[in-house]
Image (spheres, rainbow, N blue to C red):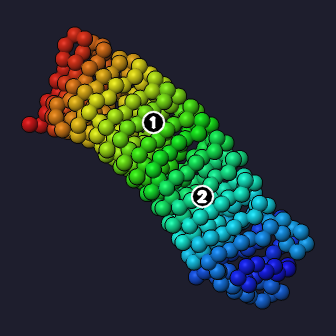
Amino acid sequence: MKKQKIENHFEFIAHDSNVPLIRKANANDTCSFTINGKANILHWPKRIAIPADSPKKGKVSEIIRDTFKHCNKITEITIPDSVTIIGKHAFDGCENLKHMLIPDGVKNIGEAAFAYCHNLAEVNIPNGINIIEKETFSGCTMLQSIQLPETVNKIGVKAFADCYSLKSITIPDNVIEIKEGAFENCFNVETVTFGKGVKIIGKRAFASCHSLKSITIPDNVIEIEEGAFEKCENVETVTLGKGVQNIKEGAFAGTKINEINIPNSVINIDSHAFAFCMHLTFVKIKKNVMSIKWDSFFPMGGDLHIYFDGMKSDWDARFTKGKKEIKYAHALIVHCLDGDIKYKSIS
């Protein structure tokens, strides 16, 4: 192996083949490696420029997993155009890293590659990236905006969770599924725009996005999974697309909606789907729905009126009552074509 000097008189160990430049960084801002059987330790500077070539013209094509993990002093890193892969946890916990320019040639960014870079305010995602992996940018609390290229087709588990400063989210048209917790706890997100390809909104995908005020689900979405928008406490309006079939447990629980129109396409409304919505008083449901749990709608702030376009017998066939007599905090009144069904309130 050959040494190659870069700025600040800092020495990297450059390999002669298409393998990573740096082996392992430690939490105390040092890098450990071995030359001729002897251990060596280097201290990281605040600014690092990774050279593209070794002295024997070996291109640096990958930054391997954990390379700069927990290097808290680093504020700026320049990645050469030769890099195509950024490994898992490569920059995880670089708390003072503020800016990152990812070269256009990068085609793969590993899990948690930039997780908990608390001061990372700007980062680009190049065209050609297909997957935003699990926890890639999780905990980047200062990240204010992100532009996902149209090449992205999957957003992984907790990919942007706990990005407290994000203001808006636009999902590209090629994304089919938004995985569990992808944008959970993005407290300042005010708008979410879904692409034309999204079919599944995963568990808690947007849970606790407190600044959201309205949600529009496009017609291409089929399933809204457990707690997808749970505790989005300032959401006042929800518009469900004509393709939604399943609304899973707690999907919109704890929102601020006062009415909801369930489209013809919906066949299942699970437990607590619209529970703990303190302002909800008006619901329209079509008889296409095959299953409604007794606690799908749980009147909390006042009597809840459900307008059902079938007979009372149709409602009874679809409504799962449970073993005990139903009693709500307030009355639940179902208006059917042949009369009303009233479920008692505790009071």
> Residue at horizontal 65%, vertical 75%?
47
Task: Residue type at mark 1: give it.
Answer: Ile
Coordinates of residue 336 in the picture (x, y in percent) = 24, 15
Instruction: Decide if residue 321 is on the left or right side of residue 171.
Output: left
Pointer 2: what residue?
123
For residue 241, above or below residue 47: above
On the question of residue 66 being in view, the answer is no
Coordinates of residue 312 in the picture (x, y in percent) = 25, 15
For residue 308, above or below residue 3: above
- View extreme (left): residue: 347
Query: Which sits in the foreground, 298 or 2?
Result: 2
Coordinates of residue 287 in the picture (x, y in percent) = 35, 17
| Rendering quarter of residue 18 | bottom right
> Residue at horizontal 51%, vertical 58%?
143
Pointer 1: what residue?
224
On the question of residue 78 being in view, the answer is yes
